[in-house]
Amino acid sequence: MNTESNVLRETALESTRVAAVSASPTRPFYWSVRRELWENRWIYVGQLAVAGVFLFGFLIHMTHWLTKMRGLSADDPRGYWETMTLPYNVAAGLMMVTLILMSVFYCADALYGERRDRSILFWKSLPVSDLTTVLAKASIPLVILPLLTFAMIVAIHLIMLLVSSLVLPASGISVASLWRELSIFQMWGMLLYHILTAHALWPFPVYCWLMLVSGWARRATLLWASLPVVAIAGIEKLVFGTAHFVEMVGIRLIGGGAPTDVTHGEMFPTGPMTHLTPLRYLGAPGLWIGLVVAAVFLVAAVRLRRYRGPV
Amino acid sequence: MAVIEARGLRKVFGTTIALDGIDLRVDEGRILGVIGPNGAGKTTALNAILGLIPYQGELKVLGRDPWRQRERLMHDACFIADVAVLPRWITVAQALEYMAGVHPRFDRSKAEGFLGKTRIAQSSKVRELSKGMVVQLHLALVMAIDAKLLVLDEPTLGLDILFRKQFYDSLLNDYYDRSRTILVTTHQVEEVQHVLTDLMFIDRGRIVLNCSMEEFEERYVEVMVRPEHVSAARALKPMHERQVLGRSILLFDQGDRAQLAALGDVRTPGIADLFVAVIGNHAAQAQGAGR
């Protein structure tokens, strides 16, 4: 009986081993993204550092915030809400600024770093197409970094909530009112929507432009990427006396001008008066024109990588 | 079966002709050494074969057009292009994981077996390894791929003699099995002489010699001529003559061994000596033609 089961087990083991060897499914895209995360550890180390600095500041500022809270009256719900949620919105805003900076620096190096350190000759010796590689790199500013940023914001908020819930009762403010005012899940939902629409899809053509230049330039990729923008802006200024182009590029990069919501003068995209407009966003020509431009840049980047060797 | 087939392969960079219409055929199971001076077009030829650069003329590698089908080709071919192209940030474990993740013919346990014979730890990053260890790692990764064609471009550049010897030993003992084809360029020609089955000299974008090692051994004879026979030997029209320790060494193409044995000590020349003779003559001819 015993031996029989042993034999059975061994045959089963054997067959799985055989299957593993003969099938050995490969996932080039998945591993290409993994490669980017290994190579660019600074993108999450940097975010962790910013989050750490913010939390440190939050703890120091805690007493000041509590004094302000105590001085608020229930007659001013607007002021109450603002004071209560301000640190949470500042945390989200700070992480989004970090997201933009990380994306810019990542993209400016995306197809340049592997040429600079000659490792492109190693990557090209493997059965991974240029298309897969470029798409994996493009997924970093489009998907990975935005989701990472959102996860970081949620983590920061949770730590802040935990600390506040411990400290608030001692100051005579009810924890329940904090949770009520904050309506944290709704806030997270709005933040996720805002990050994906305003900071991932909307500036994507700018990121793709940076990636394209990073595959072309022999040095100083950010400089080369900004030269045409400056040139076009200069010509526009001379001929028409306007500055639409540079505004368009700059505003797109920081997520401005995206018809994601109607804020009614709110400072943060999570305000109670903010009204999300996903349909208007999806129907905006600016979104689709931007994505077509992004696709053109990506196709060019794929073709360029075929021709490019080490710098 | 031809693994590599080229007809009129040509590549021009600006005004420089790197490859000047090369015809080439490499059959399965051969180990071809591509030898040439700096700037002769060796690396350009290899890059064209690997689909790294576009070219003019006809080229088929394992039946594929390398420039249009690089990704497919890399299922069956692999290469070490130059030393030190492994990314410096990658750890040995990550490299193994990545290769297993993207390459259907990569056998991770095999690579781990090769690495087990070295002092390379899986947790180390490439930047922490010595130059010799990086080459060992790269070779371990490449030998674990069940490929039909392996291309090595100066794989042992800058390594000490122990590492170089080890490199070719493990290539022959642990990898080569007569169904694989290996293409190697190197300046350390003496060390590959016993490794190669075929030999090719390139100069100024052209093939100046292409033969099997058997042909090489049959065709070329070197004689260390006894002083009294020097003028007699010179009358037989050697392709090259050099002096070593006061004695003349003459190199003959298609020389009659019996006849030459009477004049001095006969032996098969080293690739390096033949290289100097052939490339030197080629350069002189080119100069003459230019004039």
Image: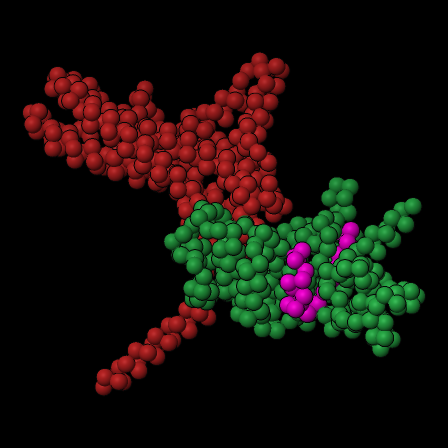
Chain colours: A red, B green
> Looking at the rendering, which quadrant does residue B276 occupy?
bottom right
Q: Nearer the viewer, residue B41 or A249?
A: B41
Task: Say if residue A84 shows up in the picture.
Answer: no
Q: Quadrant of the N terminus of chain B?
A: bottom right
> Looking at the rendering, which quadrant does residue B186 occupy?
bottom right
Residue range of the region highlighted in magenta in the rendering: B185-207
Left or right placement of residue B275 versus residue B230 in this view? left
Q: Nearer the viewer, residue B234 or A265?
A: B234
Q: Measured from the top left, where is residue B286 in percent x and y?
A: 86, 51
Residue B217 against residue A64 in the figure, above or below: below
Q: Nearer the viewer, residue A145 or B44?
A: B44
Residue A228 against residue A6 in the figure, above or below: above
Give the residue at x 43% y 39%: A141
Q: Measured from the top left, where is residue A216 in percent x and y?
A: 59, 38
Give the residue at x 22% y 27%: A58
Left or right placement of residue A190 versus residue A300 in this view? left
Q: How many marks?
A: 0
Task: Say if residue A157 shows up in the picture.
Answer: yes
Left or right placement of residue B231 versus residue B267 in this view? right
B34 within the magenta span: no
> Looking at the rendering, which quadrant does residue B69 occupy?
bottom right
Q: Measured from the top left, where is residue B9 in percent x and y?
A: 75, 56
Give the residue at x 11% y 33%: A166
Q: Nearer the viewer, residue A288 or B20?
A: B20
Q: Measured from the top left, where is residue B175 in percent x and y?
A: 55, 69
Give the residue at x 11% y 19%: A70
B188 within the magenta span: yes
